[in-house]
Image: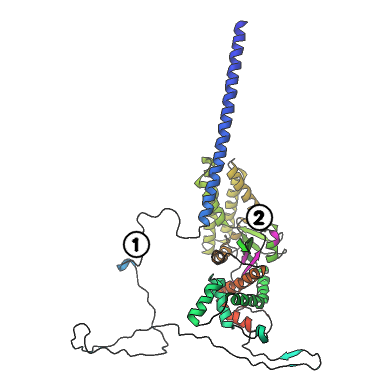
Amino acid sequence: MSGAVGEFEELRRELQRLRARVEQLEGENADLRRENAKLREALEEARRSGKRQAAPFSRGKKKEHPNKPGRKAGGAYGRQARRAPPKHIDEKVTVDCPLICPHCGGGVRLEGKSSQYQTDIPQIEPTTTEFEIHYGRCTRCHRVVQGREARQISDARGAVGGVQIGPNTIAMTAHLNKACGMSYERIAEVLAQMFGLRVNRSTLARSLLRLGRKAAPTYTNLIERVRGAPVVSPDETGWRIGGDKAWLWTVATPDTTVYQIEQGRGYAEAAKLLGEDFEGVLCVDGWAPYRGFDHAQIQTCLAHLLRRSKELREAPPTAACAAWFESVAAVLHEALALRKRRNEATISDCGLRIAKGKIEAKMDRLLEEPDLHDESLRFAIHLLRYRDGLFLFLDRADVDATNYRAEQAIRPAVINRKTSGGNRTPRGARAQGILMSVQRTSKQRLVSAIDAFKQMLRAPTPSVHHLGR
């Protein structure tokens, strides 16, 4: 009996020891999980900070042996390009050869001649035009009636509107401020130093607000074209209005780009730009509000998915998880390779459908059995949400596999934001979106935005300018 009691006590002490050990291991496990979460947060922040880097050449450790700057010597450089001689010459100057050598004082024997061409901007001085406006009053309705010359940009008279800057200056200011990101102060310096035209920053700011009002009908027309397009690429990025957080939205097609600055980043703002009944294809990056368009089809950006899978493979929680991410990326690359074969006409329509079905089956098998880890499960859920929009680009040649059009449209806006910090007022934000839309669309359609701005300013009333269409 005593032996049984002793054995029981021994088992009880072993159980207590094991329980203590389990508690210790559970505590260590919890500490390791917390540490792992902190490290993953730090890694994610490092990735984001790298993407937000304002200095494009500060990308980490310098190369130990960087390439020598400048042109490569000899045949390694290739054929050197040079400007062709101009076809039109405005002035010809003869430069005589001295008959006495400036180095030794000896006589010089003439041997020949050669031509050198110099193309430069002429000295520009501002011109002031006085419009002597004759006006009268209607004998029936008693309204003031006055004439208008085609070069005028306003009907204003008197002390308030009697002295104005012209359409060339305003159009150039719009280009320098909205396309080049120059501040009003810097633009005023350029006008003063290069052209002798002295204007205040506030004058330039008010002139662009006026230009925004004149361009508003054209902007509305661009929105209508985007809403009726079969395929669009939307995107959004951070902005500021009076120091408060805002968002710059963009929607791009092959020949039209529209910008809009809003306070929010949800479905309401997207629908304000695209319209709630948009029925085309949205090439998107995975932002959830785009799924709110019930009548639209979605093509999710494969470049975003490949980048995400690459980042997850850089620090995988398990080897099985890394293998799963690698398999997903392989299927996406296979789909892009199939698109290339279709575009090069090296596969028949029947072969394309069969190959696409095999790719979809591979992806479905991966989504049915993801690696059971938080990272892979989250990625699998995201892919399941956009399952119908993964390979739409294989069915339609007019659908892009990525939302690169929107990202290209966002890039100049981001540079503008970094130099300007955003807008001070909602009116300025609206004018910003209108003028950037006209500029970007004009560039896509290979027409001059500056000429379009000048025509808008000279129009008696705001009207639609079709920008080359």
Indicate the secondary structure of the residue bearing disc 1. Answer: loop
Q: Nearer the viewer, mark 2 or mark 1?
A: 1
* Circles 2 and 1 in contact, beta carbons < 8 Å: no
Could you tell me which quadrant the C terminus lies in? bottom right
Is 440 placed above or below 271 here?
below
Q: What's the distance in space between the residues labelled 2 and 1, CA to CA?
A: 47 Å
Residue to which mark 1 is pinned = 68
User: Residue 367, how many percent across, how many down?
Assistant: 61, 46
Q: Place residue 441 in its image quadrant.
A: bottom right
The disc labelled 2 sits on which kind of residue?
Ala
Residues 341 and 109: in front is 109
The disc labelled 1 sits on which kind of residue?
Lys
Residue to which mark 2 is pinned = 288
Q: Residue at x 58, y 18 (%)?
A: 14
User: Residue 190, how many percent across, how many down?
Assistant: 50, 77
Residue 448 seen by the camera: no
Instruction: State the count of labels.
Output: 2
Q: Residue at x 53, y 40 (%)?
A: 318
User: Residue 22, how many percent across, how many down?
Assistant: 58, 26
Identify the magenta region: 249-268
Q: Place residue 93 in its image quadrant.
A: bottom left
The residue most toward the right is: 140
